[in-house]
Amino acid sequence: MTIRSSFASFVGKSTYWLLRDVLHRGGTSLPGKIATNIDPDILKNLAQDFDVVLVTGTNGKTLTTALITRVLREKYPDIITNPSGSNMIQGITGTLLTAKTSKNQRPLAVLEVDEANVVLITKYIKPKVFVLTNIFRDQLDRYGEIYSTYQKIVDGIKLAPDATIIANGDSPIFMRDDLPNKKLFYGFDHMDQSADFKVPANTDGVLSPTDNSILHYHSITYANLGDYFSVTDGFKRPPLANAVTKINQLHPKFSNFDINGTTFQIEVGGLYNIYNALTAYAVGRFFDVTPAQIHHAFESNAQIFGRQESINVDGKDVTIVLVKNPVGANQIIDMIATEADDYSLMALLNANYADGIDTSWIWDANFEKLHQTNIKNVITGGERYKDFNVRLKMAGFTDQAVYPDLNDAIGAIKAVPTEKVYVMATYTAMLQLRAHLLEQGYIKGRVTE
Amino acid sequence: MNEQQYNLRVAHLYGDLMNTYGDYGNIIALRYYAQQIGVDVTDQLVSLGDDFNPDNFDFALFGGGQDYEQSIVAPDLQRIGREVTRFIENDGPIIAVCGGYQLLGNYFIMADGTRVEGIGAMNIYTENQSTSRFIGNVTIKNSETGEEYHGFENHQGRTYLSDQERPLGQIVVGNGNNGEDGSEGVIYRNVFGTYFHGPILTRNGNLALRMLELALVRKYPTIDWHSKLANVTPEFF
């Protein structure tokens, strides 16, 4: 390390300890910011000590990063990772700066990186592996078209041609490049392969990368993910190095499935979480973690799926799920559809900056599908309750209780006719509801995500 | 379910490519109100390489898209441009949003400066703005009906009308067509163009009922649709 880097590192670390131990403010980007100001090359120097796994994509990064870390820990004791939300360059600098590692093994760093920050990171760090989860349109990312988002990632990967790419082969967008990197694809291979159909009209990202014709599919898991092919040329999904070969059981609280013929279970519902597990499996296998070790890593993993927690409210089994875009909402709807018991739905919508100020996405989510489930009661609420109220009314749920003020929402939960309650909420609506639950003693601890 | 005596056939123009920000909700709203007066609404995708026969449709939705998809749609649209224009000149009702609105005009300039040709069904054109976008809540007022409409705009294009069209409304809050002349959207024959997401027909039930009536009177001229629709409560938020 240069003297400048050493000094930058010293000041950055001191700032971190000061913030954490004296001022009790962890998780800020300040230490990384200060160190980078002293030495812009600090990241390069810090990263020399690590093998880096860089995880990016629009959805599922946090959970996938956590699962990968858990899987790799089965074999490698020395692993660091960045906390959720610290996925931009300063947060990552801070993570590497303050990492405690032993000298026994070359440590691994599993880093969740914001899509637009990939190129900023790879300027300094040459990862061993890039993990690409998926790219969906997100209302929060108002300028982000899916193709320009992918191009940003590609621009970053171009600076690290020796890295292996472990990517979702079910997402056609990841075939839109001519990168020289070694690629390993993962995907779902559990359905009939003789079908030939197009995705429903209201789906994003259905153009073939070869000639911009509309892709056909043999099977679809959700959104535009599946076994696609072109009818105008030979383009098709690439061979999968790792695949879900069988779905054994889907349930709101767990999923049981086979990867490459071995059975796994994760203690969380939703097909998208099986993708997250599959991704972690693929990365684990790349680093020679055995299927048995991965199986062990997936056991008792409930706590890392924090966005989908169950709360007991005077006998009501309440599950809170975060929604922010149509692909995510459709996945939640599919997950709730696996509920065998009668349930009530509470849909809470806010439109603050952290929620996305444009509420139009709710019209792209297929709430009509809820009629095929055991839904018995619908409640809408939040600052933009009117949007959700009309959306669900036009989906045929004409009888709704409406709660603009979430202060009353807990009373509403207690009064529903079913034992099970699913709460679908945007980010700030979820925080508000959690604050009320905390106040009334139904949850403990701090109100965080 | 009762068999419906009346029906409206909706063409969802390039619905697999032009589908940002909930534009499909416009069909959901139309169907919701139509059902209440015993009218069935079906929709059919018309996309790359598909024919568009104006006689087969009673209504059309042309939604907004990402720049990339829009650049794929634009050349294909030229193929059916004449038929779409015939639909419009025969008073076929269209709700055209954002990119769909732009493509019915003479041309639009993408964010990167590329000029994309429209079909010129309306004498409007769209310039770009290089550094910013119009993003936020919009309220407009239609001076003929006095009706107020609510929506959310998110566009970098700046659209200008000619004297052959009239705006959908005058800006009360927001930017509208171009941020300069106080206009938002367009009305030309039975084409309603707009930058409103939200989507416009879900948030503005009065406009949904107005367009529904236009489509029904055109298809079933002997029925008193106005009286039937008078009993329907429009949503507005």
Image (cartoon, rainbow, N blue to C red):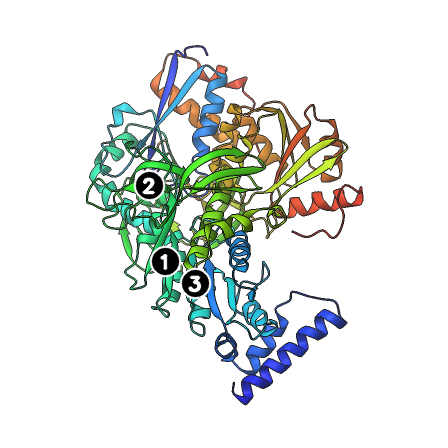
Give the camera-side residue of A228 and B119: A228
Label 1 lies in what chain? B
Label 2 lies in what chain? A
Picture layout, residue B57 above or below residue A382:
above
- In the picture, residue A287 is in which quadrant? bottom left
Picture layout, residue B217 above or below residue A65:
above
Count residues near mark 3 (Cα–Cα under 10 Å), then give few for <14, some for 14-19, many for 20+. few
The alpha-carbon separation of the residues under discs 2 and 3 comes to 39 Å
Label 2, secondary structure: give it: strand
Position of residue A35 in the picture relative to residue A208 (left or right)? right
> Which amino acid type is marked by label 1?
Ala
Total numbered labels placed on residues in the image: 3
Residue shown at the point (57%, 30%) measured from the top left: A390
Numbered circle sitting on residue B35: none
User: What x and y, as percent, mark residue A28?
Assistant: 64, 67
Label 3 lies in what chain? B
Position of residue B78 in the picture relative to residue A323 (left or right)? left
> Which amino acid type is marked by label 2?
Asp
Give the camera-side residue of A83 and B189: A83
Count residues near mark 2 (Cα–Cα under 10 Å), then give few for <14, some for 14-19, many for 20+. many
Position of residue B187 in the picture relative to residue B29 (left or right)? left
Count residues near mark 1 (Cα–Cα under 10 Å), then give few for <14, some for 14-19, many for 20+. some
User: What x and y, as percent, mark residue B224?
Assistant: 44, 13
> Which amino acid type is marked by label 3?
Thr
Picture layout, residue B32 above or below residue B61:
above
Looking at the image, tell me whether mark 3 or mark 1 is earlier in sequence order.
1
Numbered circle sitting on residue A227: 2
User: What x and y, as percent, mark residue A110?
Assistant: 51, 63
Give the camera-side residue of A165 and A448: A165
The alpha-carbon separation of the residues under discs 3 and 1 comes to 9 Å
Numbered circle sitting on residue B111: 1
Q: Which residue is mark 3?
A: B131
